[in-house]
Image (tube, rainbow, N blue to C red):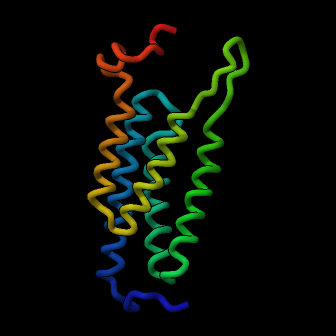
Amino acid sequence: MELFIEHGAWYTELYFLLKVLSALIAGGAIGWERESAGKEAGIRTFGFICAGACCYSVISLLVAADSASRIIANVVVGIGFIAGGVIYRAHGVDNVSHGLTTASSLWVTATIGIMIGIEMYILAVGVTILTLLTLHLPSSKLWIYLSKKHLN
């Protein structure tokens, strides 16, 4: 297996490490919002998922260009498996599902890590901001006014 980067190029690996750090920070920001909302998955979980997805993206681009899509597709499958484990159904009167927002935000966080890994920085920052805003929306007065969930 031949890598596409120059062997021993420490500055290249440092650049990749900065990508992973950026992903860890972006995922941690989303995790901070989930943690402050009292959810189980928090800063470390979201940070690790985003950083891990970034690592797999970087590796996929370095190893072989034709395998990049396969590796990224497997990240999506793996995150789907983890996110599925977050969702649970409360048996009782309402038979309500819980964890859907956390599961879907885990999925988006992995996508942000992939975007950072393949150098789509503006999109990654934009999606991070949109995700944070969307997660924070239910605590706003506008949401309470527009949503019918608070009536239940």
Q: Residue furthest right?
A: 91
Q: Residue 150 occupies which quadrant of the picture?
A: top left
**Of residues 147 and 39, which is closer to you in this image?**
147
Pinpoint residue 90: horizontal percent, then vertical percent: 68, 23
Height in image: 29 above or below 52? above
For the point 32% across and 64% down, the residue is: 120
**Of residues 42 and 140, which is closer to you in this image?**
140
Height in image: 147 above or below 57? above
**Of residues 5 and 134, which is closer to you in this image?**
134
Pinpoint residue 103: horizontal percent, then vertical percent: 55, 40
Height in image: 8 above or below 129? below
Query: Does 132 sit left or right of 67 as displayed?
Result: left
Pinpoint residue 92: horizontal percent, then vertical percent: 72, 15
Query: Does 121 sit left or right of 3 as displayed?
Result: left
Q: Quadrant of the N terminus?
A: bottom right
Pinpoint residue 121: horizontal percent, then vertical percent: 29, 61
Count of numbered labels shown in the rendering: 0
